Amino acid sequence: MSQTKNFNLPDLGEGLPDATIVEWFVKEGDVIKLDEPLVSMETAKAVVEVPSPFSGKVLKLAGAAGDIVVTGHVLASFEIDPNLPQRAEGQDTGHHHGAPAEAAPAPAAAPAPVAAAAAERADEGTVVGAMVSSNAVHTEQAVAVGGVKAVPAVRAMARKLGVDLSRVRATGAEGAVTMNDVKQAAADPAALLPSPAGTVAGGSIATAAAVPSPQPLSQAERGSSARTPLSAAGKPMRTAPPGVVAKGQPEPLKGVRRNMARVMADAHSKVVPTTLSDDADIHAWAAGNDMTSRLVRAIVSACQAVPAMNAWFDGDNLTRTLHAQVDIGIAVDTDDGLFVPALRNADMLDARGVREGINRLRQQVEDRSIASSELSGYTISLSNFGMFAGRYATPVVVPPCVAIVAAGRARFQVTPVMGGIETHKVIPLSVTFDHRACTGGEAARFLRVLIDDLAKVH
């Protein structure tokens, strides 16, 4: 008698409550082997390819591209094939499952050695770009979609740069397109391969009747007829941001924006925010000063002078943790939503190190290759919204942090000086702090140090 098993969506990263289906690599009725790519899922932090936990026939898939699946709920159902390799009893992927809507029967107790090994793995958690199986970490494999092999981060970069993956010369292992291949193609369009018949620039299918592929199709590719035109060409490897669908239609928030909504609502309910604002006069700056690097240095100086602002606060237990190091969360705005990666040990970095660190974090955010661990654990945060517009703000403090610095758009203003007036360049600053954890005096002294440090020539 055949055996049927359900696969519940695992926790793809630090307790996230749900994830959005980006693309299935199989369709109902296909046969898939253990650890072959099953589906690409978008969480609040990354696009992750989820491998199959079983070998067998796919009986049912939970939803289509764009649908949201709750962590712990059924993602797919399988008819197990005993003639194909299966995961040993008691092994798992290292991900933690939430409570499913309908609990499955408890499995038989695993042998003691297996149970002990599983217990050792219980705290492994999830690493973006990797899935844990048994005691080994398997990095994401390049999957052929629309005849093009590439990992999610490469597909995301190609989409951002407007590069048609089907026209990129692949130099990676087993014919996979690498990140460097995409960047070189973007820099030198003349190096692109001729556009395949039936496609247009960007990889979209030009006609409903596609020209037969000159190469044998894999099982996953044979199911591509059920995918959207963009997906059949290898795009997108993330869900579309709001605004690209028909206007006036309500739509569920997904991925990063969905998590952002939860985080902001939680912060609003837990923090007692107060904001102080002032201007920093940067008239004395020598040429070549990096605005963001100077802001980071000023925050470090202010944190060292007023440690109460470089802290975490536990409102439930009324405890405060002061930090010796300064890890600054740098707000990065994207079409997908807000990311806040952490610039670690900012107090140990010089101006060059700060700039290199910020550039690295921004690049990883843009191509969605940033690790989950880099998006949490900062001790204070910075929003440099002034690069777009605006003077002052009331930025949101996200617990457990107690403070955030916001820098507005620099401007020139008339400044009284001895014997007359001058035109000086100033940066508007806003500091929001949790008044449960910090006093007004501490916040004001913090802001004073910020202003004084920014006023220096170098």
Image (cartoon, rainbow, N blue to C red):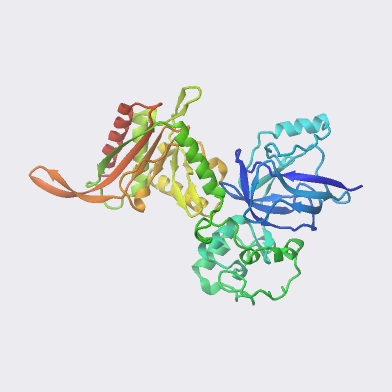
Residue 106 at x, y = what percent?
80, 34
Indicate the position of residue 367 as horizontal and vertical percent values: 54, 55
Report whether 204 appears left or right of 90. left
**Quick one: 183 or 385, which is closer to the camera?**
385
Residue 376 horizontal/vertical position (percent): 51, 39
- Percent across and percent down for residue 321 are 46, 26
Which residue of the protein is positioned furthest toward the right in this rendering? 1
| Numbered label tally | 0
The answer to whether residue 53 is visible is: yes
What residue is rendered at 50% in x and 24% in y?
A: 316
| Whether residue 456 can be seen here | no
Corner quadrant of residue 354: top left
Is 443 located above or below residue 3 in the figure?
A: above
Quadrant location of residue 320?
Answer: top left
- Give 45 or 369, whichever is nearer the viewer: 45
Q: Is 66 placed left or right of 300 in the picture?
A: right
Nearer to the camera, 171 or 395:
395
Q: Quadrant of residue 117?
A: top right
Q: Residue furthest left?
A: 419
> In percent of the image, x 55 and y 40: which residue is there?
373
Q: Quadrant of the C terminus?
A: top left
Q: Is residue 2 left or right of residue 269?
A: right
Residue 197 sits above or below residue 19 on the image: below
